[in-house]
Amino acid sequence: MILIPEIPFSFEAICQKVQKRKESGRKFSIFAVSEGAHPKGEQKVFRRAEDNLYVARLGGIGQVVGKFVESVCKSETRVTVLGHLQRGGTPTAFDRWLATRYGAAAVRAAAANNFGHMVALHDAKIIEVPLVDALKEPKRVDVHGDAIATARDLGIYLGDEVEE
């Protein structure tokens, strides 16, 4: 199951899917829950509310879904925050060289007093992008696009449809 912000999910649908998997002999289900995912008609879950010092920060929906699956669907759950897990691993030569290129480009931008920009990889070139442009529009999943159609064709459940 994959839960994303662009497709509000149904707790009832999740429980039905977990039950259906159990009945077919599957002893486990794996969920990927994106921060920003939320149940239909409910607000997103925030780790930190917006105040005078901090900007609001999404966080915790994976734990909410995990607790629901454990308590209502009666399935043991274990929640792993992938952001922590993804920081591990051995870097490849490409990773090392890319980090060097990013670092050098950032230093060149700072030396030129070109603040308010970030460096990015675009068509195999390191470019400077104004932060205003980079943050202007969030990257969203096209719910009518190829990625969602392919996921559904592969049997990946997105939490929005009640099983019949």
Image (cartoon, grey):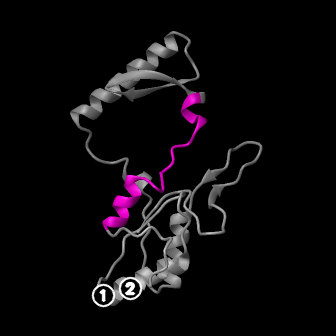
Q: Is residue 97 above or below residue 13?
A: above
**Quarter-wise, where is residue 11 in the image?**
bottom right
The segment highlighted magenta reads 133-154
Q: Is residue 88 magenta?
A: no
Which one is nearer the viewer's eye here, 98 or 152?
152
- Residue beneath label 2, please? 20
10 Å crowding of disc 1: few (<14), some (14-19), many (20+): few
Amino acid found under the numbered disc labelled 1: Ser
Which one is nearer the viewer's eye here, 11 or 47?
11
The quarter of the picture where the C terminus appears is: bottom left
Q: Residue at x 51, y 48 (%)?
A: 140
Location of residue 87 in the rendering, given as x and y in whole percent from the top left corner:
37, 47
Q: Is residue 103 above or below residue 89?
A: above
State the residue lying farthest toward the front. 144
Q: Residue 24 bears which disc, if any?
A: 1
Location of residue 143 in the rendering, given as x and y in whole percent from the top left corner:
48, 56
- Of helix, strand and loop, which one carries label 2? helix
The answer to whether mark 2 and mark 1 are in CB contact below 8 A is: yes
Location of residue 129 in the rendering, given as x and y in whole percent from the top left corner:
50, 24
**Quarter-wise, where is residue 154 in the image?**
bottom left
Q: Residue at x 49, y 59 (%)?
A: 4
